[in-house]
Amino acid sequence: MSQKNSAYSQSHKTLRIFPDKFISWSKSLLNPLSYLLIKSKISPNTLSVLALITGLGAGVLFFFGQPFWAGILIVICGILDTLDGKVAEEAHKKSLYGAHLDSTLDRYSEFFIYLGIAYYFRGHWAVWITFWTILGSFMVSYTRAKAESLGIKCKIGSMQRGERMISLSAAGIIGSLLKIFDIFMIVVLVFIALVSNITAVQRILYVKKAEKLIRKEAE
């Protein structure tokens, strides 16, 4: 990609729901734990598998009507998902296989969480919102992956995996504590469904604009 196209990418930075400073600060809290894991020689891929297991566990807990503990497991899943990348980078164990495995298992764990929520809302109209949420969540990832496979960096939009996990865990934990889980989770699902699908459309249009710029440069 040319310098001009790179500049175009930089001018369309990601608008995160949570500020970058907050995200960086929250990740820095895990530094002592990542150091301990590196000293213990824990493989980043092992952490990715553990994140999958906790995501599956969260889905099972939603399935059995235990949203508070499901929310706790989503928090643990998010921590493990952050740690696998930190350990891989800081221990110099980054690999294409590891990155591919991590991304793939993330999709599986997120699907299991939504599946549990969908079962919780079985027979309720909110189950249809869950399906739109699943679609939007996966399209956010797919549109970025497809764009980058075409050589176009595409990180614009909101409601990335971190935001989705935080929102779902908050709905489970806070909603249960305040005894308003159903309505809280429905609001969160609607929010995720709307923003994630909007993000997918934004990325489609972004690729169109980026291609036009590339063609102009080639003339």
Image: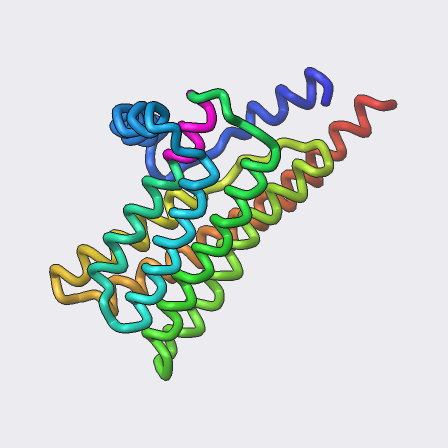
User: How many labels were placed on the picture?
Assistant: 0
Above or below 103: residue 173: below
Residue 2 is left or right of residue 10, and the answer is right
Quadrant containing the C terminus in the rendered view? top right
Quadrant containing the N terminus in the rendered view? top right
Q: Residue at x 37, y 79 (%)?
A: 122
Q: Residue at x 25, y 67 (%)?
A: 183
Depth check, front residue: 40 or 137: 40
Q: What percent of the width, then of the height, locates residue 131? A: 47, 68
Residue 159 is left or right of residue 94, and the answer is left
Residue 169 is left or right of residue 12, and the answer is left
Q: What percent of the width, then of the height, locates residue 18? A: 33, 37
Q: Residue at x 38, y 78 (%)?
A: 125
Above or below 214: residue 115: below
Q: What percent of the width, then of the height, locates residue 21? A: 32, 25
Q: Is residue 86 magenta?
A: yes
Q: What percent of the width, then of the height, locates residue 33? A: 27, 29
Q: State the image quarter where residue 120 is shown.
A: bottom left
The overriding secondary structure of the stretch rendered in magenta is helix
State the residue lying farthest toward the top: 3
Above or below 157: residue 61: below
Depth check, front residue: 42 or 124: 42
State the residue lying farthest toward the bottom: 123
**In this picture, which residue range is highlighted in magenta?**
83-90
Q: State the image quarter where residue 118 is shown.
A: bottom left
Q: Is residue 156 magenta?
A: no
Above or below 3: residue 86: below
